[in-house]
Amino acid sequence: MKLLNRFSILLIIVFCFIILTLSLRGLTGNPTSKELAAPKWELNGPFELSPERGRFILTYSILENKSFQFSDNLANFASPDVAVTKDGKYASLFAPLVSFITIPGYIIGRYLGTSQVGVFAVIAIFALLNTILLRQIAVKLGANNFAATIASVVFIFGTPAFAYAVNLYQHHMSTFLILLSIYALLKTEKFWSFLIVFFLCAVAIPLDYPNLFFMLPIGVFALGRIISFKSKKSKLLIKTNLLKILTPAIMIIPILFFLWFNTVSFGNPFQLSGTLKTIQDVNKKLISKSSIERFQPSLEKTSGNKKTAIGFFKTRNILNGLYIHFVSPDRGIIYYTPVVLFGVIGFLLALKKKVQMTPLLTAIFGANVLLYSMWGDPYGGWAFGSRYLIPSYAILSIFIALLITYWRKKVLFWTVFIFVSFYSIAVNTLGAITTSAIPPKVEVLNLEKLSGHVQKYTYERNWDLLVAGHSKSFIYQTFAKDYLTSIQYYQIIVVSIFLVMGGLILYYIAFGKDKND
């Protein structure tokens, strides 16, 4: 049985790698700063949204221009998300670490004549690692091996995690830090595991500032493992390990990197890029009707004219934010990935069975949902589904693995689960191979006035693009376009996932066990 489990893990890894490769967005070529402004790279290509452009441009500027600041051409390409420093220079508005981590991908891609694809491929690697980690965590918590594999496939292909595994966003890297920290704590309580956890807690901040709140429960949990309190004869005793108590000191390494970057980029080690003034377009070009993003109004509000690190978060936004993330047709879980709602049932059963780590997983999920429900732009700009909740999709998928383990023999459950899973996979595969640039409903009326025609704000927009023959898959555009229509390409991918998913489910129902094997 162990040999079969290992073989199945290898097959799933290979399968996920193939599907991610087929879906990875990109074009052939090593574009220069002037060439990047062409529609083939921006509006019609892989850099359809400013977060992708901004992070890629920092990588580009570091390697090609040997600078953390942007030239006019690069700043124009990365706008509107470009920070203006006090001395009038242009710099990245985003936390820097994603751009540094993707440097090897750029170098390898440039050597192969596909620098942009190399950068995007780094994100796909992290997505694959997340799939593996999720499975291993679920098994450690008591899920059946095949149940954990099914849940990991649900996460990577049945949620918006799929669409954001094939382009340049930070979400999979952030999720990786969370999952690796949890796995380290589950694996052992030795010195090195705490060293890893505290290092990752610090690394999370220069990766994406909100990660501070998601990693905080993990850091507190780790400290609770190191320091324990015990009451004895009206005295409070503190017990700790002298070696382990030193492990938080490793956090200084990522923090020093962050302070160094801020100093070089902004002239102030404590200056956060998100608090700097931004420019909409360095050349003040006129708005074009064909533009996807540059004319859209900012949904983020600040207090007065001064931007602060927490100014984008307001408690009065919570109810609307929860509606956007869970129920709304333009971003809601119910429309884009209803399969993860089974994780709620799994969570309740895990509480009942007192599964370890359930409080920690709940705290991470709660921090993720609450923070981005208070966010001034809960839509995530132009996005496919609720991209901010990708860490929560991973947490819920862990609970799905436990639910599948507990309910293996429930026929009604499997009937509903299979239908909802296939729906979620079909929707999110659509997003992966077409576009992530779906406008929120609140912007559609203005967009229709500018464009002169009806605009859709759900995954119907993705379907229309697919029918029109548009797919941003690198493999499709480079090798398959002359042999397959975009719909046929989509069908091959989605049917392949269906068959593998269905095979896993049928095998598990027939031969699996109700506990870890």
Image (cartoon, rainbow, N blue to C red):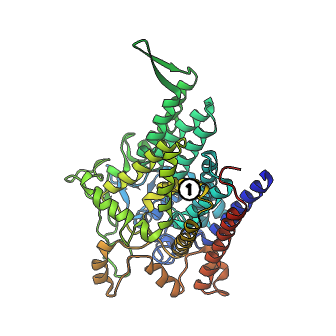
Q: Is residue 250 above or below residue 429?
A: above
Depth check: give the residue in front, 326 or 315.
Answer: 326
Q: Residue furthest left?
A: 304
Please name the residue shown 19% across and 53% down the image: 304
Q: Quadrant of residue 413?
A: bottom right
Task: Answer with left or right where residue 241 lies relative to residue 1.
Answer: left
Q: Residue at x 62, y 61 (%)?
A: 409
Rendering coords of residue 184 (x, y %): 60, 40
At x 49% / y 46%, what residue is drawn?
352
Q: Is residue 433 above or below residue 306?
A: below
Which residue lies at the image location 50% right of the left edge and 49% below the top edge?
97
Outermost right residue: 3
Q: Residues within 10 Å of mark 1 (few under 14, many from 20)?
A: many
Residue 207 in view (yes/no): yes
Q: Where is residue 486, by image quadrant?
A: bottom right
Give residue 61's position: percent from left, percent from top.
50, 57
Q: Can you say whether 484 is above or below 177 in the image?
A: below
The location of residue 121, given as percent across then percent down, is 61, 62
Please identify the quarter of the rendering in which residue 319 is found.
bottom left
Q: Position of residue 162 (x, y in %)?
A: 55, 66
Q: How many marks?
A: 1
- The answer to whether 132 appears left or right of 33 in the picture is right
Viewer-proximal residue among 98 and 59: 98
Residue 173 in view (yes/no): no
Which residue is denoted by mark 1 in the rendering? 403
Question: Looking at the image, which is closer to me, 249 or 409?
Answer: 409
Classify mark 1: helix, strand or loop: helix
Q: Is residue 196 above or below residue 444?
A: above
Q: Amino acid at mark 1?
A: Leu
